[in-house]
C-alpha cells in the first residue's frame, strides 16, 4: 500500500482540489455536528493535505499507517500532531468531536470484518454527540473491469507516469499500478498492487449501526463518491 510511490503521492494527486473539498466538508460538518467540542482527527490522513485547510476551523490531528507519508506530513505541517496507527486497531488517549476518513481510504481494510472494526474503532474515539464522516470507495456495481486509468506528472525535476488496468477478485478491486519515474537521480520503474474492498451501501450502513451510530448518507459527497455521516448518541 503506497510503498515506493509514497514519496510521489503529493505530485501524483497535485490536481486534486483539497481546498475546495475541505470547504465543502466543513459545511457538511456544520450541518450535522452536535458535539460542542472543536477537535478533529483525520484517520488515514496521508500527507495531511485536507488538514492544511481544516485547521482554520478545527483543532486538528492526523493518523496514518504509512510512515513515509507521516514523515512528509510532519515536515509540511510541524504544528499539527500526527499519530502512527492502523485504522482498525489504533488507540489514542483522547476523544474527538469529529473524525474523518476521506479519499476512499476505508477501502484499504479490504474485508467486511475489518470494515466493521475500523468504524467501531473510530466510533470509540468520538465524544458523545460526535460525528464520523467517511468517504467510501466505489460500490461493487460501479467497479469496471479492464478500465484504464492514468496519472501524469510534468514538473521541472520530476516526470512521472502511473498507469493501470482494473481487475477484480471476489470482493476486491485490483489495480497493478505501473510507475515510470524520471528525476535528476535517474529513471526508475516499479509496480505496486492496490487492492481495495468493494462494499455495497448496506455494508457501510450496517457497520455504522453496529458501532452505535445514527447513519446518514449524501450521494454526491466531496467528489462524487458520496459521504456517510455517523452521529454518536449522548452518554
Image (cartoon, rainbow, N blue to C red):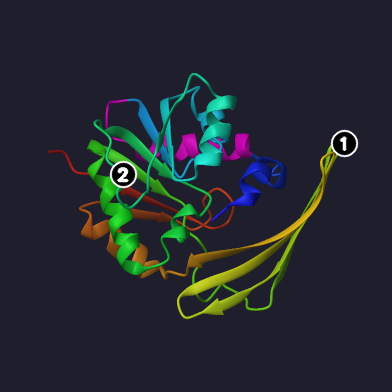
Q: Which mark is residue 199?
A: none
Determine which residue is flagged by label 2.
Answer: 90
Q: Residue at x 50, y 29 (%)?
A: 54
Determine which residue is flagged by label 1.
Answer: 156
Between the C-alphas of marks 1 and 2, the distance is 39 Å
Q: In which quadrant will I find the N terminus?
A: bottom right
Pick the residue in front: 190 or 175: 190
Left or right: where does residue 88 sit relative to residue 232?
Answer: right
Q: Residue at x 58, y 40 (%)?
A: 21
Residue stretch rendered in magenta on the structure: 18-37
With respect to residue 154, does 113 lie above or below? Answer: below
Q: Magenta segment: does it hold 95?
A: no
The quarter of the picture where residue 175 lies is bottom right
Left or right: where does residue 159 sit relative to residue 162?
Answer: right
**Residue 231 appearing in the image:** no
**Residue 118 appearing in the image:** yes
The picture places residue 154, in percent across and down from the top left corner, at: 85, 44
Amino acid at each position: 500500500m503506497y510503498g515506493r510511490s509514497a514519496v510521489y503521492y503529493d505530485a501524483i494527486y497535485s490536481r486534486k482540489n483539497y481546498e475546495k473539498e475541505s470547504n465543502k466538508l466543513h459545511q457538511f460538518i456544520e450541518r450535522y455536528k452536535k458535539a460542542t467540542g472543536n477537535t478533529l482527527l483525520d484517520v488515514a490522513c496521508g500527507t495531511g493535505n485536507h488538514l492544511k485547510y481544516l485547521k482554520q476551523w478545527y483543532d486538528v490531528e492526523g493518523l496514518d499507517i504509512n510512515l513515509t507519508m507521516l514523515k512528509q506530513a510532519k515536515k509540511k505541517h510541524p504544528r499539527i500532531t500526527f499519530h502512527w496507527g492502523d485504522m482498525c486497531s489504533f488507540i489514542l488517549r483522547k476523544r474527538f468531536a469529529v473524525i474523518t476518513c476521506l479519499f476512499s481510504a476505508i477501502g484499504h481494510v479490504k474485508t467486511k470484518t475489518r470494515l466493521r472494526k475500523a468504524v467501531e474503532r473510530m466510533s470509540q474515539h468520538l465524544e458523545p454527540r460526535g460525528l464520523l464522516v467517511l468517504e467510501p470507495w466505489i460500490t461493487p456495481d460501479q467497479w469496471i473491469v479492464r478500465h484504464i486509468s492514468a496519472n501524469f506528472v510534468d514538473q521541472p525535476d520530476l516526470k512521472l507516469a502511473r498507469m493501470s488496468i482494473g481487475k477484480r477478485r471476489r470482493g476486491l478491486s485490483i489495480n497493478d499500478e505501473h510507475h515510470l519515474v524520471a528525476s535528476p537521480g535517474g529513471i526508475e520503474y516499479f509496480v505496486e498492487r492496490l487492492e481495495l474492498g468493494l462494499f455495497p451501501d448496506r455494508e457501510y450502513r450496517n457497520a455504522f449501526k453496529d458501532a452505535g451510530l445514527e447513519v446518514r448518507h449524501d450521494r454526491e459527497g466531496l467528489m462524487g463518491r458520496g459521504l456517510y455521516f455517523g452521529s454518536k448518541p449522548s452518554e
